[in-house]
Image: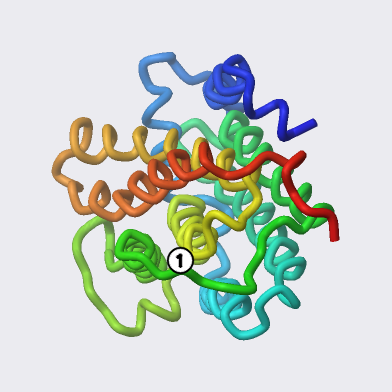
């Protein structure tokens, strides 16, 4: 069903329209201040309240990267399960804040659209079409890995450039949707074309949406924080590459049954 769904043009229209579902706020928000409430939620979400989990999420991301390399297909179901758990936590708690100028706020559109991505990974848990048995290294796959590493590091502090080795292990990147996504895409693309077409395409599609929105936000609307735009380039680039690559992956009907 999902294989057929991603071939329909209207599916992409619906997914992108869902992203614009109005937020739920304690106080009424004037339409012209909608971008402000989004910015406030993402700068101070519930998921950032417990910094003790920052290194835990980083460890989980390292496992997601190293697991397929070491355990190969023995890890593919765990890869999807860990990713679903991590992304579910982030999708909900990164899009809720109790401390905005409008009281509590819930970015409902973000939660739903990220939930669609999670559904495709639940689907992968069932069908297990990611094949981690072999790697075909190319220059562009190495580029995607480097971009994924940059997102994993997320070298910034208060929106400005800040390179710190310790941040590789303790900052909030592991609980940030826009940083987790390029890491996951870099892993999938490493094993391309032997990956799940549905999860790759939908993850890349939603990643491209958030990538474009953030590039516009940080390079145009808030240019003083241009470094935040740079930090979102891995999301934008890996998502574009993921979308392009997903077009050449064989359909479910062509898979060999195990």
Q: Quadrant of residue 89?
A: bottom right
**Does residue 193 sit above or below 10 in this rendering?**
below
Q: Quadrant of the C terminus?
A: bottom right
Identified at 52% across, 50% down, the residue is 45
Q: Position of residue 90 (x, y in %)?
A: 60, 54
Q: Position of residue 52 (x, y in %)?
A: 56, 76
Q: Is residue 233 left or right of residue 2?
A: left
Of 247 and 217, which appears nearest the observer? Answer: 247
Q: Quadrant of the N terminus?
A: top right
Q: Position of residue 77 (x, y in %)?
A: 76, 66
Q: Position of residue 107 (x, y in %)?
A: 57, 34
Q: Quadrant of residue 5?
A: top right
Whether residue 252 can be seen here: yes
Identified at 36% across, 16% down, the residue is 32
Residue named by callout 1? 172
**Does residue 37 sit above or below 132 in this rendering?**
above
Of 178 and 64, which appears nearest the observer? Answer: 64
The total number of labels drawn is 1
Q: Is residue 202 left or right of residue 219?
A: right
**Does residue 140 sit above or below 110 in this rendering?**
below
**Does residue 62 sit above or below 131 in this rendering?**
below
Element on which disc 1 rests: helix
Identified at 61% across, 34% down, the residue is 113
Q: Is residue 246 left or right of residue 117?
A: left
Of 70 and 57, which appears nearest the observer? Answer: 70
Q: Can you name the residue that lies furthest to the left here?
A: 224
Q: Is residue 19 left or right of residue 223?
A: right
Identified at 54% across, 59% down, the residue is 188
The 10 Å Cα crowd at callout 1, few under 14, some 14 to 19, many 20 or more, is: many
């Amino acid at each position: 069903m999902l294989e057929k769904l991603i071939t329909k043009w209207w599916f992409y229209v619906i997914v992108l329209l869902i992203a614009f579902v109005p937020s739920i706020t304690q106080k009424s928000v004037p339409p012209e201040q909608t971008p402000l409430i989004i910015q406030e939620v993402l700068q101070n979400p519930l998921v950032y309240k417990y910094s003790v989990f920052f290194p835990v999420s980083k460890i989980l991301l390292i496992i997601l990267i190293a697991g397929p390399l070491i355990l190969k297909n023995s890890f593919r179901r765990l890869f999807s399960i860990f990713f679903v758990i991590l992304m579910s936590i982030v999708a909900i708690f990164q899009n809720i804040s109790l401390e905005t100028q409008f009281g509590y706020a819930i970015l409902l559109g973000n939660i739903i659209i990220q939930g669609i991505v999670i559904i495709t990974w639940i689907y992968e848990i069932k069908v297990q079409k990611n094949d981690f048995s072999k790697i075909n290294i190319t220059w562009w796959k190495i580029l995607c890995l480097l971009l994924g590493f940059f997102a994993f590091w997320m070298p910034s502090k208060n929106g400005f450039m800040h390179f710190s080795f310790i941040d590789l292990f303790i900052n909030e990147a592991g609980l940030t949707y826009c940083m987790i996504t390029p890491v996951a895409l870099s892993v999938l693309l490493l094993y391309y074309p032997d990956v799940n077409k549905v999860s790759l395409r939908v993850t890349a599609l939603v990643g491209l949406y958030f990538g474009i929105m953030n590039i516009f936000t940080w390079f145009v609307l808030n240019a003083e924080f241009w470094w935040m735009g740079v930090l979102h380039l891995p999301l934008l680039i890996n998502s574009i590459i993921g979308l392009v690559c997903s077009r050449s992956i064989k359909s479910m009907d062509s898979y060999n049954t195990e």
